[in-house]
Amino acid sequence: MRMLINSPQTVVADALRGMAAAHPELDVDVERRIVVRRDARDGGRVGVVSGGGSGHEPLHAGFVGHGMLSAACPGEVFTSPVPDQMVRAAAAVDSGQGVLFVVKNYTGDVLNFEMAAELAEEDGLRIERVLVDDDVAVTDSLFTAGRRGTGATLFVEKIAGAAAEEGAPLERVAALARQVDECSRSFGVALSACTTPAKGSPTFDLPDGELELGIGIHGEPGRERRPMMSAREIAEVAVGAVLEELARIGPADGPVLALVNGMGATPLLELYGFHAEVARVLAERGVPVARALVGNYVTSLDMAGCSVTLCRADEELLRLWDAPVRTAALRWGL
Amino acid sequence: MRDADFFRRWMAAAAASVEREADRLTELDSPIGDADHGSNLRRGFAAVAAALEAEPVSAAPGPVLQLAGRTLISTVGGASGPLYGTLLRRTGKALGASAEVSDAELRAALSEGVGAVAQLGGAVPGDKTMLDALEPGVAALGTSYRAAASAAENGALATVPMRARKGRASYLGERSVGHQDPGATSSALLLAALADVAESADAR
């Protein structure tokens, strides 16, 4: 397997050095692995801190900046960061208004952020946490660690960040973040496995002519393997699964935010074609799409495939979604 | 009685064993996890070995394990960092500040450590986690250190037919069946390192 790296041991640090060189508006601590927006403490805002394993770029460091995250803590590839990183990040962005931790529902992330929250609170900071768990592929959650956090993380970080930018207090920012999580569901498919630098070969074997349905974002196989399907057929399955789970929350009453997300190795040509099918299915089911985003945002290294995330959005969420954002990977309105 | 040096040697043996077995742990982690258990633990235990070398030699057994646990939490990440870190920290805390501890005290302390891991991870034996090696291992400590190592090893082997209910492997459901749990495997290594160090100490 050929990779554009120096060594598996230095991939994360090397990527952070590159971010620092490309984005002088970010304060990148390569050694401690914290990315902070330089103006994080200006204006007495609530801090919004996220983090997780590396390999999901641009998540999370690519979303640090005006109107989104105050700081991000990248861990090793597919491995949660350690509490020290989160405690330092929280201290670096706290302006006395408290800090929201955005945590994806994976055992490692949950445990490390939990420890970090305790330590930061001992240091006198006010910490709130929101757990993102949007993946509908995890149905029998009694027998798992709960639904995984995937694409909805982007919605949570954008909307919580916009609220913090406006000066909303910590409780309000946290409540909006939880509302976004509760109103969002995702479903992913893999057309290939991914290759972690440490292992150097694909994490599972996916024969030609087959695909994995119901994947997460860590190169793990999905819920079931099926013969290859067309974009049209995949959209039917994915959107159907997401809408079915959204219906459990309550009756549909309005538009959705839609994210068609690439897993890293699927070109935009394919993603836009897939989005056309997603939009068609949603139109057929009478679900209006208020805003759509298509691209590689919550990736899984070099995995081919995509995920669909839908968030039922009220006017407040749409307003916060439209609010200006200026980060490495997402920017509009400024 | 076991002094601080015994616990330093245990941690050094564990670090060497993890280093030796890192590729196998990562291999076990590929089909049901994300192929990094070996590399993560290797990084953590290397940091433990370095931290203990930097510490003054006079430390008591309890602080040695607490430092090792804190170091793992600060360097490993993922789920194994907090879980292994908690195991060693809580065991060390239970040992207190005595300069020497008896085998019975170590047994009791380890059992507190394992209890803390179960509480933190919310897992029970049978969930296909490190507890499936740690619980039988610590239960067999009453017989001998070697018996504990064997029980943990058997516990790790017994995870093969289990369906994972915790951690990332749980998302695979039935597809997690047929693979040995990497966390249970590394837990067995930890108890095997303890048995090796105890036997070499007793042979002196």
Image (spheres, rainbow, N blue to C red):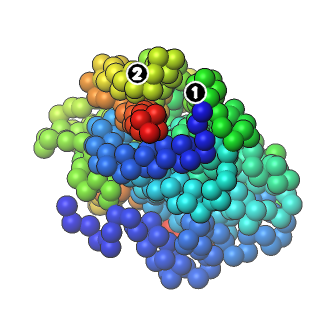
Q: Earlier in the sequence, mark 2 or mark 1?
A: 1
Quadrant in the picture for residue B107? top right
Task: Give me the chain letter of mark 1.
Answer: B
| Left/right of residue B151 with respect to residue A184 in the rendered view | left
Say what amino acid the circle numbered 2 marks.
Ala
Q: x, y percentage for residue A36?
A: 65, 69
| Left/right of residue A198 with respect to residue A249 in the rendered view | left
Q: Residue at x 49, y 47 (%)?
A: B9
Q: x, y percentage for residue B204?
A: 44, 39
- The one nearer the camera, A8 or A181, is A8
From this view, report whether residue A281 is shown above or below residue B151.
below
- The one nearer the camera, B181 or B171, is B181
Disc 1: which residue? B103
Marks 2 and 1, Cα distance to the nearest angstrom? 14 Å
| Left/right of residue B14 with respect to residue B77 in the rendered view | left
Mark 2 vs 1: CB contact within 8 A: no
| Quadrant in which the N terminus of chain A appears | bottom left
Q: x, y percentage for residue A249?
A: 60, 26
> How many other residues sit within 10 Å of disc 2, few (<14), some (14-19) or many (≥20)?
many
Say what amino acid the circle numbered 1 marks.
Asp
Q: Residue at x 65, y 59 (%)?
A: B56
Res B43 visible: yes
From this view, report whether residue B30 is shown above or below residue A92.
above
Q: Residue at x 83, y 70 (%)?
A: A43
Disc 2: which residue? B147
Task: Give me the chain letter of mark 2.
Answer: B
In the current view of this chain or complex, which residue is farthest to the front?
B204
Quadrant in the picture for residue A26? bottom right
